[in-house]
Amino acid sequence: MLATAQTCAVLGLDGYIVQAEVDISPGLPAFNIVGLPDTAVQEAKERVRAALRNSGCEFPLRRITVNLAPADLKKAGPAYDLPMAVGIMASSGQVDLPDEGAVFLGELSLDGSLRHTTGILAMVSVVRDQGFKKAYVPAADAAEAALVEGVAVYPVPTLSSLIEDFRGETLITPVLTGGMPPDDGWSPPDAMNLADVKGQDHAKRALEVAAAGFHNLLFNGPPGSGKIMLARCLPSILPRMTSEEALEVTKIYSVSGALPADSPLILQRPFRSPHYTISNAGLVGGGRTIKPGEITLSHRGVLFLDELPEFSHTSLESLRQPLEDKVVTISRVSGTVTYPASFMLVSAMNPCPCGFFSDPKKEYTCSASAGTRYQKRVSGPLLDRIDVFVEVPPVAYEKLVDEAPAQDSSHARQRVEQARDIQRERFKDNGFLCNSEMGPAEVWKSCPLDESAKALLQAATQRLNLSARAFHRILKVSRTIADLDAAKDIGVAHLAEALQYRSRGVVG
């Protein structure tokens, strides 16, 4: 007898409907799985056999063939355990499948209980898009699945409870799919506060400008000047994510298996800080089974690279395309996957190997050639994609002992949110969320300059030998500074501040 249970596969961040076709025929006992299964899917044979027996069901001692269709799509992971078990029970006549279209997702334990399964949000999303009305998921993943509206989510704790539901003995109550939680579910992140940073007023201002427009930022200064502390203050001034952004980030972390067990929806913007020994695959993504890297895990948030020149040349150069296109495409023998990568790059570096080239009170122990080689580890094309360059000098004693209250992050975050509201209104018809996402056409439309500002920009372009990319990035930063002032047009003061964030001696 042939039975078919619907399930899902995940490729990248997209889900695909998969049919688990189960045929039980006379012959020597055998259990075969076809349809490009990986090792985890092949091992489902033992999990399904033990789960059925420990749930009070009969495991047929006949020839069992499971086909995961379409056969040209590679199947990976243990999410196919439940549909195979359901298909075997239906094919052997032990249960009847629901009349309405239902999809089954979940990994089985040997005792028949269902374990947490990664990628539930992506899979339930495609369940809705393909017109299915029911999704049977592990009870631990029900809250995550309920973020998708329009699907009845059935939390299944054990295989035996699902059998009782099929037989009408004890019904499983579906979870209400209410979509996004109310706005009061968000609170400012518990991060470092700008009030804790002594001095560095210029760097704090640059941090606020970068946060308001989602601009890439580079801190350059000697050791101990506060570069890392400033960067770790950034989450405290970033605005909250929109509902669309939160769902995007949650889907990424769900597929990656990094979604916190107690948080079905990520509300805080990611702040990723990988060590400089990270591999290129760890940064960009990849592996035998293609997984998102730190670039994608930073989507809609911050990727902080401390000791920027210490990262491998390959890793640094791999940032160039995602910074420009806001996506990263990974091509392997097993296939090609495109992940979103709209992140804010924040980096910190010393001016030389010893770190004291720009410190007037410390002895500079590097040779001139060593300092030059150190700076050249970061290529010109990568630096050209950074909007804001900030010199972070050592903090004077008077600033360190100053007890006067400094402006805290809440005030800066309020100004950033007001600027973001202006940008959201400006770009409501073309889908952009912030100034850094503007293309050349939008730059000319959204960045009007008065005559004095045009003259200043012309002189700066010639004097600094700006590339076309750097030219447009200066206009974007100017637009953000004007938004912080709630100004309609970009004035000379706004443009002058943006120009001072272009570091001397940097390409572009």
Image (spheres, rainbow, N blue to C red):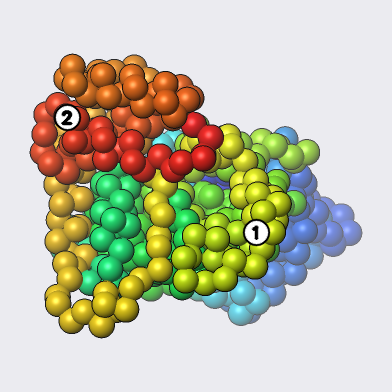
Q: Disc 2 and disc 1: Cα gap in Å?
A: 39 Å
Residue drawn 69% across and 70% down?
A: 47
Residue 169 - label:
none
In the visual, does 267 lie left or right of 308?
Answer: left
Residue drawn 21% across and 79% down?
A: 402
Residue 491 - label:
2
| Residue at the right extreme, as displayed | 28
In the visual, does 312 lie left or right of 101?
Answer: right
* Front residue of this view, candidates 348 and 350: 350
* Amino acid type assigned to the residue bearing label 2 in the image: Gly
Q: Quadrant of residue 181?
A: bottom left
In the visual, does 20 lie left or right of 495?
Answer: right
Residue 504 visible from this viewpoint:
yes
x then y, percent, for residue 164: 45, 69
x then y, percent, for residue 131: 40, 37
* Amino acid type assigned to the residue bearing label 1 in the image: Glu
* Front residue of this view, candidates 126 and 223: 223
Q: Quadrant of residue 400?
A: bottom left
Name the mark nearer the viewer: 2 or 1: 2
x then y, percent, for residue 187: 22, 67
* Front residue of this view, candidates 99 and 41: 41
Residue drawn 60% across and 59% down?
A: 352
Regarding mark 2 in the picture, which secondary structure is present there? loop
Q: Which residue is mark 1?
A: 310
Query: Is residue 273 shown above or below 418?
Result: below
Residue drawn 75% across and 69% down?
A: 46
Query: Is residue 486 shown above or below 155?
Result: above
Label 2 vs 1, first from the N-terminus: 1
Q: Mark 1: give few (<14), some (14-19) or many (20+) Cα within 10 Å.
A: some
